[in-house]
Image (cartoon, rainbow, N blue to C red):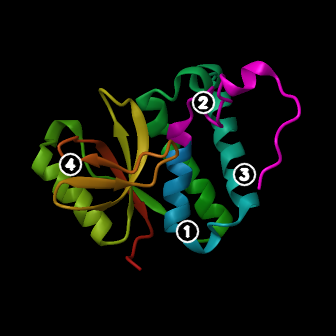
Amino acid sequence: MAMPISNSLPMARQIEPYRQGQLSSLCGLYALINAARLICHEQASDQTLWSDIYAHAIDRIGSKRHLRHALLHGLPYESWKMLQHPICDELSRRLGQPLRMRVLVRRKWRTRINSADRIRAAIDTERAVLCALCGTHEHYTVITGYTPTRWYLHDSAGLRWIRQSVTPEARATGYPMAR
């Protein structure tokens, strides 16, 4: 049984506290780290490793003078794409194992069916799929599963799924071989 509060600030009942991430917009960075943790699942609980990768990414963003903008407004799509390979390379170096990324969907040859087939194939070969939800959502996330109508997400904002009719820009991450 919870003890009753003897005294509290009156507004504490009316104003919800900010949650981590509400004042920063680094979903793109979290998507990169979350995808890598799924692929490198043996190290998923190594807080030091992921804190170091996060710090490395912040240094990369800061070195391009984009940190303030990224914290307040998120990573622009091109900056997010440019951050992916350096983070992947740093993680490969630290783990002593190759980790690679490859483009799944390009705007110039994107159709919804082609994109969906490529994303499904990546998931079927145990690759996490980083994606940018452009348009309404303006969010970066990781696709980890699917049904005939939904993409299932491993998402820093708590999103669980999106309709497959949403065609994301997508990249697959993973080891060169399926596990």
Q: Is residue 21 magenta?
A: yes
In this rendering, is residue 1 above or below 18?
below
Q: Secondary structure at mark 2?
A: loop
Alpha carbon distance from label 2 to label 1: 27 Å
Q: Residue at x 64, y 25 (%)?
A: 67
Q: Residues within 10 Å of mark 4 (few under 14, many from 20)?
A: some
In the foreground, 83 or 168: 168
The label on residue 22 is 2
The label on residue 91 is none
Alpha carbon distance from label 4 to label 3: 33 Å
Q: Residues within 10 Å of mark 2 (few under 14, many from 20)?
A: few
Q: Amino acid at mark 3?
A: Ser
Of callouts 3 and 2, the N-terminal one: 2
Q: Is residue 105 visible?
A: yes
Q: Amino acid at mark 2?
A: Gln
Q: Work out which quarter of the rendered image holds the N terminus and state it.
A: bottom right
Q: Amino acid at mark 4?
A: Gln
Q: Position of residue 112 (x, y in %)?
A: 13, 45
Report which residue position mark 3 lands on.
51
The label on residue 164 is 4
Q: Position of residue 40 (x, y in %)?
A: 55, 68
Report which residue position mark 1 lands on.
40
Q: Secondary structure at mark 1?
A: loop
Alpha carbon distance from label 3 to label 2: 19 Å
